[in-house]
Amino acid sequence: MSLCKRRGFIFQSAEIYGGFRSTYDYGPLGVNMLRNVKDAWWRSTVQLRDDVVGLDAAILSPPAVWEASGHLANFTDPLVDCRSCHSRWRADKLTGPCPTCGSTDFTEAREFNLMFKTHAGPVEDEGAVAYLRPETAQGMFINFANVLQTTRKRPPFGIAQVGKSFRNEITPQNFVFRTREFEQMEMEFFVPPGESSTWHEYWIGERYRWYVELGMPEDRLRVRPHGPEELSHYSSATSDVEFLFPWGWDELEGIANRTDYDLRQHAAASGARLEYFDQGTGERYVPHVIEPAAGATRTMMAFLLAAYDEDEVGGEARTVLRLHHRLAPYQVAVLPLSKKETLEPMAREVLGLLQPHFMCDYDTTQSIGRRYRRFDEIGTPWCVTVDFQSLEDRAVTVRDRDSTEQVRVPVDGLLAELRSRAGTA
Ligand code: ATP
């Protein structure tokens, strides 16, 4: 957490006013990394497939949507008050006495709805009520017919969305793990009813692999099926991908079999026909839905935790983030060896050569050793140093973050060298 603040990954929101509980702002490094997490998800879920399309739906929606989805009635957590200090807790997460005062005297649990309610327009009456979405998923269900008609996709196919969701969590905690405003990466995969179990297994495997391919160590990752008492109101089976956080195993993502629950609910409530008609076979059915639902902000935190390392280089302790190059806030740092003006034109030429292909930073301050440490600490995989020799031989030094190995590379071959290291040659 302190590295996040000190280096500009994540700041407490409204900090100059004393902070606003459970909201965070993503700084210059954090915004890059969060985008990278979302882009990596979009790339594997949408770009590299021909059976998933994207969507960006509204955050504000009318009560009818949440009435039909079941969220108005069911999207609740059990809330208890401590009778002694009046703090409030989620009954299902409370295992012992009140964490604030130690009392065991609690009120009866009552259901607390987690949706943020607001009013759209200048009149604050019941007719103007709107909700901030607590999940992005409903956007896909209410646009199911639109997407079907406009894309010619047919089951099995998916609709993916990345965006903000809001939940009035009773006990937001653990930094950005649980916040009231967060980002999700969700995909609804519509399949013929008989194929839902097979696709459920398939997506559990795909999603687990995504984390591993981005460098998550497998001994801190597991898949855990939900017990029957844990299942959400819409789910017939759910497995979570969990990460070993400092406080224990906890959820990164839920992969649920939502059956035909949502499409049927919305069809009944709206009168729209939400089904698929197969012209080939003459068959008409309501698809079942497999949903991998991940949190972008929570996942970013897990990648940071997994990447954090301390080792020794040249007898000196260093902090290093061993982030996958796709996730690192900067892939390349261009560093003129000294501030001397003679190096600047060539260093800027190298920067201009790399910027269209990599997120780069340019840094001339302090000694080269200090600069290497600073870029190690924020996870930059490659530093490119321009020195006085470079002016004569048109070659630069490429330093690797993890091995700290340095090699001399001609400027003409630099892009190819870095691309091949990044596996995009
Ligand atoms: P929990 O039981 O922890 O409240 P959930 O099972 O209700 O979470 P889902 O509805 O399955 O969560 O949401 C999908 C994903 O969205 C979660 O796995 C998580 O990564 C993310 N997410 C959910 N709520 C929050 C939150 N308050 N803050 C950050 N991320 C969240």
Image (spheres, helix red, strand yellow):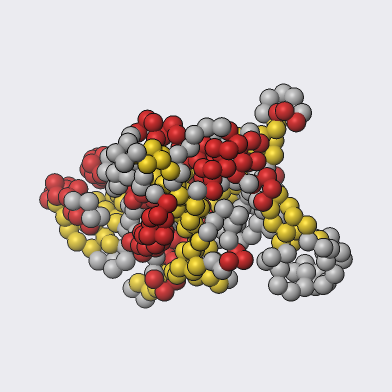
Which residue in the rendered view is the most extreme toward the right? 84
Q: Is residue 254 left or right of residue 94?
A: left
Residue 398 image offset from top left, x and y in percent: 23, 57
Residue 84 image offset from top left, x and y in percent: 87, 66
Residue 3 image offset from top left, x and y in percent: 51, 60
Give the residue drawn at x 53%, y 63%.
251
Q: Dividing the picture into quarters, in which one does residue 354 lie?
A: top left
Which residue in the rendered view is the most extreme toward the top? 122
Q: How many marks?
A: 0
Which residue in the rendered view is the most extreme toward the front? 282
Q: Is residue 71 above or below residue 229?
A: above
Image quadrant holding the N terminus, namely bottom right
Residue 318 image offset from top left, x and y in percent: 41, 69
Q: Is residue 268 above or below residue 293?
A: above
Give the residue drawn at x 44%, y 31%.
146
Q: Nearer the viewer, residue 124 or 274?
A: 274
Give the residue drawn at x 36%, y 44%.
155
Q: Nearer the viewer, residue 152 or 409?
A: 152
Quick check: can you spot residue 394?
A: no
Quick check: can you spot residue 407?
A: yes
Give the residue drawn at x 51%, y 61%.
237
Q: Is residue 418 left or right of residue 114?
A: left
Q: Nearer the viewer, residue 354 or 49?
A: 49
